[in-house]
Image: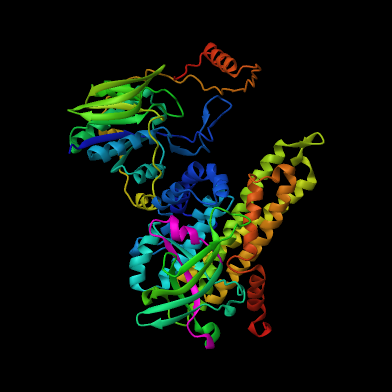
Amino acid sequence: MMSLNIIVLVKSVPDPKTPPTLKVDGSLDLKNVKIVVNPIDKYAVEAALQLKERYGGKIIGLSLGDHDNIDIFREIIAMGVDSFIYIKDPDYQRFDTLQKSYVLSRAIKKIEKDLGRVDIVLCGVESSDTNMGVLASQIGEWLEIPSISYVDKILEIKNGSIIVKKIIEDGFITLRSRMPVVLSIADTGYEPRIPSLRDTIMARRREIPIWKTSDLSLEFRETVLKTVRFKQIESKRLGKIFRDEDVDKMIDRFFEELKRDGVSLLR
Amino acid sequence: MPWDFEFTKEQEDLRMVIREFAEKHIAPRIIEFEEKRMIPNEIIEGLAKLDVFGVVLPEKYGGLGLDPITAGVILEEIVRADLTFSLAVAYLVHTSWGYIASKYGSEKFNEEIITKAAKGRLWIGIATTEPQAGSDVAGIKSEARKEGSYYILNGEKAYISGIREAREQFPDGGGHLTLVYTDKTKKHRGMTFFYVPMRSPGITYRLEKEFGRKGWSFGSFAMENVKIPEEYRIGEEGRGFYIAMEGFDHARAYIALANAVGTKRALEIAAEYIKQRTAFGQPIAKFEGVQFQLAQHWAEAEAAYNLAYKALWALKKEMEGKINRFEVTKICATAKYFAVTTAKKALDDAMRWMGAYAYTEENPVALALKAVKSYDWAEGALEIMLLIIAREVLGREFIR
């Protein structure tokens, strides 16, 4: 049986159910925000667990942030990852996405020193706070390995390569890649497991090592992206009603209008 | 007394586990519970996988060994998702009587039965009531006689929850802690408790068409020369009545919590409705006549909720040997009485605010009211609760 070394990247985000509000100066008011695990990252964790169940191996969870609420990661441990490492940096909020991916890729390099080659790095397709969706490709670049974004499902690992079903604009495509590889997992092909009460209790007793970015021998560059300001988006219901005798015609019209508004649809 | 209204972090973690499962898998299907008169297997299996059936059972036998307060936190999430109370019954009966069975059962019984109960492979229920004896427990007629290392049981039990589930649905079946006489001349002191597997030869049963909480079966079973190994005796001969009373305290505390939480949830649902629905040109919620009723019921439900947790706290203290039996019985009876009486009034009013829409089979408030009605009797009639409270307040000499 093969044995895979898998790293799952998990981000802490403000609870999407109660998003932060804006202060008068336009900055985010994070004071009363509840921090949770980025919901889509749980699909990546599930993908990792299913790989381990099928091929054997070890899963390490990895997160970068500036808060002290490490308890939120216990749910990921309860789901079944073997260990979890949290990198804490007080300057995290000032990092741009390239710096974040740089820190994470250095941490992956450090983990490799103890663990041996990491075969697969997984993350969710995007975070619910910034919705950038660029982490997988950036990590791939930093580590100089292939990356595939928007993976619906990992189909198979064979002869050192991995076969995945990837979501594309109007459907799916099956891709083969050599390993190591970075994959971002969508919330379509997997159903994250709910940990048992026993595993939840046991997870509370587990230690979560906290690393500092100063331990990672980093050479920081200038931030490429700068946050100019945040703006509250107002969403409105259009409440459009289609009235027509023929149901098929109404459906066609509905899709036409969506298309006209720039909504792309999976078939 | 120092008092802390906060749950521990562990309890909050466990709450979130059950909430996630309940929102995803339970809440969308409760109408199906009622229509099919059963809980789908996937839900039972899913809860079993999460260790829900082993919460208070000893770690030594595969349970989690958690306390009644933590068991209450889990019950809260089950009730919030299922206002039919079918799953609440499944959980709280098994949790209460499973604990009692384990506490007083033999080593062999624990190894054979409790290990399976903790994994949710087997369900444990309670059978004291008979066709002619409910609150009047001493009036039961079922009896057991000893033959070698077995007991032979005969009699009939009525209005019992979970017969079908213990016979057919759980992979390893299940059984009921069944109260019978081993010596009729000694009255209460002649009663003994047995674990009676519902798949035993000699058991016949009949199911009722219940008024509410239809997802968990409710019926009668007859025992004709049912052979039960002596290891399935729960506690000593002659201690059955007292062990049953202890088990009722557990069940009453959980019932109190289920009623309080169910009421709060139903009030939330009704509140959402009356904020949307208008009458005479404004939302129903703007009428003070409705507001005052809502506020009053909310206050009572909140009081019932805290009283229920006091009862669960008392059970925890009893496990730690820090409180006496009579005090526990008094608190549990008080909690059940208050929670059930206030729940019925609140749910009745909440249905009225919701108008004719409330009078449908799918209205969650109506489902809750039908379920709560069962607690006029289940695990001790409300009048018995009053007798217990009066006895403890006035003294035994004032009770006939």
- The answer to which image quadrant residue A36 occupies is top left
Foreground pick, B276 / B295: B276
**Residue at 39% in and 41% down:** A193
The residue nearer to you, when weighing B346 against B163, is B163
Q: Quadrant of the N terminus of chain B?
A: bottom right
Q: Which residue is at 65% across, 68% downward?
A: B382
Residue A126 visible (yes or no):
yes
Looking at the picture, the colour scheme in use is rainbow
Measuring from the top left, give residue A153's x and y in whole percent: 34, 29
Count up the numbered dots: 0
Residue A26 place in picture, x, y as percent = 55, 24
Q: Is residue B262 above or below residue B124?
A: above
Residue B204: horizontal and vertical position, in percent? 49, 66
Determine whether B136 is above or below A144 in the image. below
Q: In the picture, which quadrant includes the C terminus of chain B?
A: bottom right
Q: Nearer the viewer, residue A151 or B215?
A: B215
Q: Which residues are magenta?
A: B159-185
Residue lying farthest to the right in this orientation: B280
Taking the view exactly as shown, the residue that stands out farthest to the bottom is B185
Residue B131 lies in magenta, yes or no? no
| Residue B69 makes an appearance in the image | no
Residue depicted at 59% across the width and 50% down the height:
B83
Instruction: Name the residue: 61% across, 48% down.
Output: B265
Would you say B319 lies left or right of B62 here? right
